[in-house]
Amino acid sequence: MGLKFEDVDILDFLGKIVELNTHHYKDDFDLDRDLILGLAGTGEPEDRRLLWMSRPCGTYTLREREVYLEGSYANNVWRFYHEQTRDTVLAYALSVKDAQDGKVAGNIYPLDYGAHVEQMKRLTCPVGKLAVTFGDGTNIIIPCQEKGRLINELTPLHGQPKSITDLPENERELAMILKRERFKRSYHATPGDLKKYMDGLKKSTLRGKLKEAQAAASTRKPPSHKRETER
């Protein structure tokens, strides 16, 4: 049974995780912060359902929907650090509710990263189409197998592609998978104590252990260098 933290300051929470678990390329989180703030303001429900990970060397923010599309960039990233590395990964599902004055409020679900990847692999949907946004703002959906030819034909008319988004072969199937997985995650999660959770991470992560040791050392009294008065 997992935990959930409801109506919390998402960016503040993730920033604390970065301090505990991400030792290098911490500026990745600056990009995450901007991305999460931007997605929170789009009004698209799927832009508010995200997966986030902290690694010793960086962080990632991914749309949950895209993680479940087989072979997509998000799918490959989410799988890679489980299948190809032994990195300590702290992973979370984010449900964004509101963004105001640089703060993002919502719910956070800590994930068992390895178990989540294995479950996701059993449920992924094939990519069938691509949504392409061209330089002049034109949006066109094209079949995957026609990607190269159609983009080459359309680029002289509409400019270079600005973004390419993977779309499922079966939209209804993907929607049902996401609905079911999110319901299970929320239903089986119990409200967590944020302070207790963070204290537990401090005791288990390398950086947390180091900070505890430094704090303990700073409170110790230095040994006295005074010699006893000679008689």
Image (cartoon, rainbow, N blue to C red):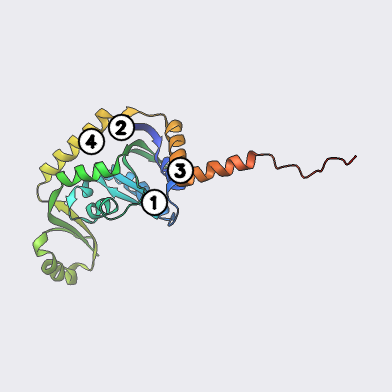
Read off the residue under disc 4.
182
Read off the residue under disc 1.
34
Q: Looking at the image, tell me whether mark 3 or mark 2 is earlier in sequence order.
A: 2
Q: Looking at the image, tell me whether mark 1 or mark 4 is earlier in sequence order.
A: 1
107 relative position to 204: left or right: left
| Residue 4 found in image quarter | top left
Q: Give coordinates of residue 108: x percent, y percent.
A: 34, 37
Identify the amino acid type marked 1: Asp
Read off the residue under disc 3.
16
| Secondary structure beneath label 2 | loop
Q: Which mark is residue 2?
A: 2
Q: Looking at the image, tell me whether mark 3 or mark 4 is earlier in sequence order.
A: 3
Q: How many neighbours does mark 3 have within 10 angstroms: few (below 14), some (14-19), or many (20 or more)? A: few
The residue that appears at 29% across and 53% down in the rendered structure is 81
- Looking at the image, which is closer to me, 191 or 37? 191
Q: Nearer the viewer, mark 4 or mark 2?
A: 2
CA–CA distance in space, label 1 to label 4: 25 Å
Identify the amino acid type marked 3: Lys
Q: Which mark is residue 114?
A: none
Q: Is residue 188 visible?
A: yes
Q: Give coordinates of residue 50: x percent, y percent.
A: 29, 44
Q: Looking at the image, tell me whether mark 1 or mark 2 is earlier in sequence order.
A: 2
Q: Nearer the viewer, mark 3 or mark 1?
A: 3
Q: Nearer the viewer, mark 3 or mark 2?
A: 2
The residue that appears at 9% across and 62% down in the rendered structure is 145
Q: Give coordinates of residue 192: x percent, y percent.
A: 38, 29
Q: Give coordinates of residue 127: x percent, y percent.
A: 13, 53
| Secondary structure beneath label 4 | helix
The image quadrant where one finds the C terminus is top right
- Looking at the image, which is closer to me, 53 or 127? 53
